[in-house]
Amino acid sequence: MDIHYFAAARAARGLAHERITTTAATLAELVDELGRLPGAGTTDSGLSLAQVLSRCSFLVDGRHANMDTAISAAERVDVLPPFAGG
């Protein structure tokens, strides 16, 4: 599965995107797994990846997803922190 990180999520992970193998069945399980990945750093304000993920919205294969969304057949997840501006 391809994970694409934006803004603060990118800063905390230290990557714009990565390909992972997961057994997560739901987005909630994936988010928990992502928050525990080794090598994650922090944002300039000191937030960990897990802290950033708790504030994010997500797209699964281009569609808005909630934590109950099934992801077993998903190819891509976009991690979207809150954005300021318009």
Image (cartoon, rainbow, N blue to C red):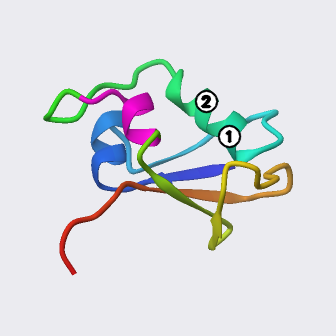
Residue toward you, 5 or 52 = 52
Q: Is residue 50 magenta?
A: yes
Secondary structure under badge 2?
A: helix
Which residue is under mark 1?
28
Type of residue at label 2? Asp
* Dot label at residue 36: none
- Label 1: few (<14), some (14–19) or many (≥20) C-alpha neighbours in 10 Å: some
Instruction: Farthest residue to the bottom: give it.
Output: 86
Residue plotted at (68% across, 40% down): 28
Q: Are marks 1 and 2 in contact (CB under 8 Å)?
A: yes
Type of residue at label 1? Ala
Residue plotted at (41% across, 46% down): 55
The magenta-colored residue range is 47-53
- Residue 72 in the image: state x and y as whole percent: 85, 49
Q: Is residue 19 magenta?
A: no
Q: Mainly helix, strand or loop, the magenta region?
A: helix
Residue plotted at (36% across, 45% down): 9
Which residue is under mark 2?
32
Q: How many marks?
A: 2
Secondary structure under badge 1?
A: helix
Residue toward you, 19 or 70 = 70
The relative height of residue 84 versus residue 35 in the rendered view (above or below) is: below
Disc 1/disc 2 C-alpha distance (Å): 6 Å
- Residue 60 in the image: state x and y as whole percent: 66, 62
